[in-house]
Image (cartoon, rainbow, N blue to C red):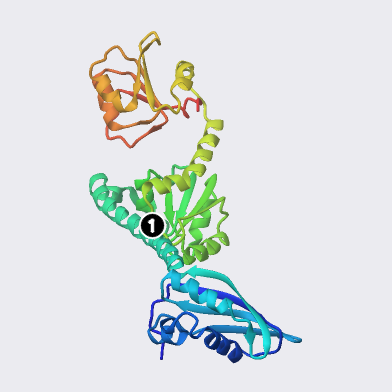
Amino acid sequence: MPYTGIVKYHVKLSFEVDGLVERADIVGAIYGQTEGLLGPEMNLNELQRVSKVGRIEVNVSSNENTTTGDVLLPMSTDIDTCALISAAIESIDKVGPFESGFKLNEISDVRASRKEDIVKRAKEIKQKWSTKSVSEGDTMLKDVHEGFSGKITTYGENKLPCSTGIYDSPWIILVEGRADILNLLRAGYDNALAIEGAKIDESIKDFCATKSKVVAFLDGDRAGGMILNELKSVVNIDVELRADSGVEVEELTPQRIADILSDTKDSMQKESMKSESVSEEDKLLSDIVGKVYNEINETLESIALDTNNDQLFKVAISDLVDKLSIQSGIKYLILDGIITQRLVDGARQAEIECIIGHRIAKLSNSDGINLKTFTELQIS
């Protein structure tokens, strides 16, 4: 009768027979010589009848006067029964008239392998759908709040979607579509141009020729790879980047985009520094900040200096805004972090002249305060 049980274990054995035999001889020996050894309820025929053992698979190979091969028993019993059946088969010493030997190689847990496959697939599902759900929810809220659609325009006769910063930026990011541009805007990149399909518009080649670096940032699927090959045949690409395998650029979180583009952004900043002219005012500020930079770098702390460049306090960034509400006489605020709008608002109330940090977030109002990054001052 057909096997209907759920396989739990695979019992795998090998054998050697001192003579030439066929598959049917091996199967006959397994059934015949194990019958009655362990009681009637443990006979292989009975176990198959109640769907505890599946069809026995046998592979044979003959060489001169010797036959070797392997046996596979799919079983849905407990591990104790598997062990008894294995031991019974190992006791077989004859196949027909010939001497033989059977040896257990492995009892593998089929469910463990299935669990690994399930966990692997679950991770893939989580990565795809969590990033997509976060992206979609984040997209709607941020599009309403920040009006990113207003930062998208078009380029060329075919009106290819692009962010408004592509004209002023020394480098450009080529993506597949408008949704990718929106997602890059959320991550702080306003220099993206969409190629809109596998057929590359000739105007893109001319525009890219005006940039110091061209970055291709495409989806992590097969289509993304095909588009990349087509793009390279038309445009000189300096950096090739892809979203995670099976994920589209529009599905990536802003943090993941920042991670993927970080090396390219850093290299562009270094190139910009090499050609950047620093004003005398910034040189003086660089000297002041440079004296305390190592004291706070990678500490998530901040230091406040007065008009004499003397240190007023040193606190964690998490406590900084509260500290500013009760402190006066600060001229310079130097922090191991990002200059945010909340921090700028607190600094304005404390009448601080200048804030220096690693990066400046998107601000709605920074009037009256000089904002600088360590990179601009050629410190980090």
Residue 231: x and y in percent read 53, 61
The quarter of the displayed image where residue 321 is located: top left
The quarter of the displayed image where residue 341 is located: top left
Q: Position of 201 compared to 363: left or right?
A: right
Residue 176: x and y in percent read 43, 59
Q: Position of 119 compared to 10: left or right?
A: left
**Residue type at tag 1:** Gln
Q: Secondary structure at mark 1?
A: helix
> Mark 1 sits on what residue?
127
User: 371 above or below 199?
Assistant: above
Of the 4 image quadrants, the one containing the N terminus is bottom left
Residue extending farthest top: 308
Front residue of 296 and 42? 42
Residue 376: x and y in percent read 46, 28
Residue extending farthest right: 64
Report how many numbered discs are placed on residues in the image. Answer: 1
The quarter of the displayed image where residue 243 is located: bottom left
- Local packing at callout 1 (Cα closer than 10 Å; few below 14, some 14-19, many 20+) is some
User: 206 above or below 371?
Assistant: below
Residue name at image x 54 percent, y 64 percent: 230
User: 84 above or below 321?
Assistant: below
Front residue of 189 and 155? 189
User: 312 above or below 272?
Assistant: above
Residue name at image x 36 percent, y 51 percent: 183
Q: Is residue 198 visible?
A: no
Residue name at image x 27 percent, y 20 percent: 323
Residue 227: x and y in percent read 50, 64
Q: Is residue 357 visible?
A: yes
